[in-house]
Amino acid sequence: MSSSLPATASPAAGRELLLQVNNIEVVYNDVILVLRGLSLEVPKGEIVALLGANGAGKSTTLKAISGLLKTEDGEVTRGEIRFGGERIDGIDPHLIVRRGIFQVMEGRRIIADMTSIENLRLGAFTRADGGVKRDIEMVFEYFPRLKERTGLAGSLSGGEQQMLAIGRALMARPKLILMDEPSMGLSPLLVKEVFSIIRRLNQDLGITILLVEQNARMALSVASYGYVMEQGKVVLDGTAAALMDNEDVKEFYLGGHGTERKSFRDIKSYKRRKRWL
C-alpha cells in the first residue's frame, strides 16, 4: 500500500486478523469501476477507521464486505475478501450476517413505521437462540433513551435513530460491525456521545469495528489504525496516532489551516496529494 508513514506501521502487529480485503476491484452496472485494487486489514478486537472525501469509495468498500453490492448492480470483479480466514466475497448478505458481520448503513435506515423494540427484534432475524429479550435489555443499558421511546421509530430524533441503528446491529451478536458515517446529521454534542458509545462497545463487548467517517478527528480518536482513500484506492495508512500527526492528513482531513478551501490546488501541498495518486 502507498504510505509515507514508517514501514513498521502495521494494523496486525502480532494480532489476529479478522478481516482481510485483498486487492479488490468493484464495478457497477458492468461499466463503472469504483474500487481500483483496494486492500486493507482489520485485526480482531480493534477499531479501524476508513477516511476519505465524498466519492472516494468508502461506502462501496463496506458494501463489498457485507455483500450489499448486489442490491445496487455492483460486483467484486477482482481480488478477494476473507473473514476469519474464509472467503466471503460472492455469498449472499444474509449468510454474511450469520457469519458475524453487520453493517450500520449511512442514514440509519431504520424502519420508521415500526417501534424501537420491533426494529431491534429485526436485527436478530438470523438468530435461532432464545436470548433476544435479554439482548434487548442489554441494548437499553447502552441506550437508555430508547427504552423510554415506546412510539414509532420515525418519531425519534436523529441521534436516537442512530442509537437504534447501532442497537439493531448489536442484536445480531456481530463479531464485526461496519459503520458508515455514524456522525452524519448529528449535533457536535451527540457526535461525542455516539463515539463514546462506539468506544464502549469495542472495549466492553470486544466487537471489532470498521468505521467509515468524514469526521476524521473523531474517527482517529477511537481507532487504533486508519486508512485514507482517494479515487477508489488506499493512498495512506498507519496507526491512528501517526495519521493524526501526518502533515497530509492534517492538511486535508483535520482542518490544519482552519480556512475553507475550494480545491486542493489552492494550497502548496496539492503536489503532495497528487503524489499519493
Image: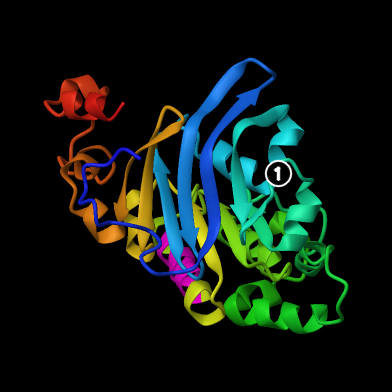
- What residue span does the magenta drawing correspond to? 190-200
Going 52% across and 54% down the picture, which residue do you hit? 182
Relative to 1, 127 lies left or right: right
What residue is rendered at 79% in x and 46% in y? Answer: 92
Q: Could you say where residue 240 lies in the image, as x and y percent from the top left?
A: 30, 58
- Can I make out residue 107 in this image? no
Image quadrant in which you'd find residue 189: bottom left
> Residue 214 magenta-drawn?
no
271 over 1 or under it: above or below: above
Left/right of residue 211 with respect to residue 118 in the rendered view: left
Q: Secondary structure at mark 1?
A: loop
Q: Is residue 213 left or right of residue 88?
A: left
Task: Tell me: residue 63, above or below residue 240.
Answer: above
Where residue 250 appears, as percent x and y from the top left, is: 20, 45
Name the one closer to the observer, 83 or 62: 83
Residue drawn 83% across and 69% down? 127
| Towards the viewer: 118 or 99 | 99
> Which SS type dominates the magenta stretch?
helix
Task: Count every numbered label the image shows and give the total.
Answer: 1
Query: At 56% from the left edge and 21% from the top edge, which residue is drawn?
Result: 33
Q: Quadrant of the N terminus?
A: top left
Tell me if I can see residue 88 in this picture: yes
- Residue 4 sits in which quadrant? top left
Q: Residues within 10 Å of mark 1 (few under 14, many from 20)?
A: many
Q: Where 98 sits versus 132, above or below?
A: above
Q: Which residue is mark 1?
A: 67
Q: Quadrant of residue 150?
A: bottom right
Q: Amino acid at mark 1?
A: Gly
